[in-house]
C-alpha cells in the first residue's frame, strides 16, 4: 500500500461522512448498549431472547468499523 499523495489532476475519492470511523463506532457502541439493556430488562421475553444476537451484531460491527478510514 502506497502512502504517496495522488498524482496531480487526480481526485482522491473520500468516504461519505456518515461512513467514517467516528460516527459508525458510535452506532456500534449504541447497538452493543441496546443489546446489554435488552439482556438486563425483566419485562419482555422476546427482548431477552434476541439480546445476545444484538450484542453480537454490535460487536462484529465495531470490529469491522474499526478498519474504516478516519
Image (cartoon, helix red, strand yellow):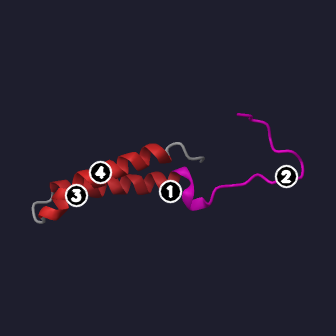
Residue ID for mark 1: 23
Q: Main secondary structure of the magenta part?
A: loop
Q: In this view, does 31 lie to the left or right of 26?
A: left
Does the residue at mark 2 contact the one at mark 1 (Cβ under 8 Å)? Answer: no
Q: Quarter of the image for the N terminus: give it.
A: top right
Vertical position of residue 1 compared to residue 40: above or below: above
Residue ID for mark 4: 55
Q: For the point 16% across and 64% down, which residue is it?
A: 46
Residue ID for mark 3: 50
Labels 1 and 4: the sequence-earlier one = 1
Mark 4 surroundings: few (<14), some (14-19) or many (≥20) residues within 10 A: many
Q: Distance between the residues labelled 2 and 1?
A: 28 Å
Q: How far apart are marks 1 and 3 (CA)?
A: 24 Å
Which is more foreground, mark 3 or mark 2? Answer: 3
Q: Residue 10 carries which label?
A: 2
Any magenta on residue 16? yes
Q: Distance between the residues labelled 1 and 4?
A: 18 Å
Does the residue at mark 2 contact the one at mark 4 (Cβ under 8 Å)? Answer: no
Q: Which mark is residue 11?
A: none
Q: For the point 13% across and 65% down, which residue is it?
A: 44
Labels 2 and 1: the sequence-earlier one = 2
Vertical position of residue 65 compared to residue 34: above or below: above
Q: Which stretch appears magenta?
A: 1-21
Q: How far apart are marks 3 and 4 (CA)?
A: 9 Å
Seen from the viewer's position, the closer of residues 10 and 25 is 10
Where is residue 66? Give x, y as percent. Answer: 49, 44
Vertical position of residue 7 compared to residue 48: above or below: above
Q: How many marks?
A: 4
Labels 2 and 4: the sequence-earlier one = 2
Q: For the point 74% across and 35% down, which residue is it?
A: 3
Amino acid at each position: 500500500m502506497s502512502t504517496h499523495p495522488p498524482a496531480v489532476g487526480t481526485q482522491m475519492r473520500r468516504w461519505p461522512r456518515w461512513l467514517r470511523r467516528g460516527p459508525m463506532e458510535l452506532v456500534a457502541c449504541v447497538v452493543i448498549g441496546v443489546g446489554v439493556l435488552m439482556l438486563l430488562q425483566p419485562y419482555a421475553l422476546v427482548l431477552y431472547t434476541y439480546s445476545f444476537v444484538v450484542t453480537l451484531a454490535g460487536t462484529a460491527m465495531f470490529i469491522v468499523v474499526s478498519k474504516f478510514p478516519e
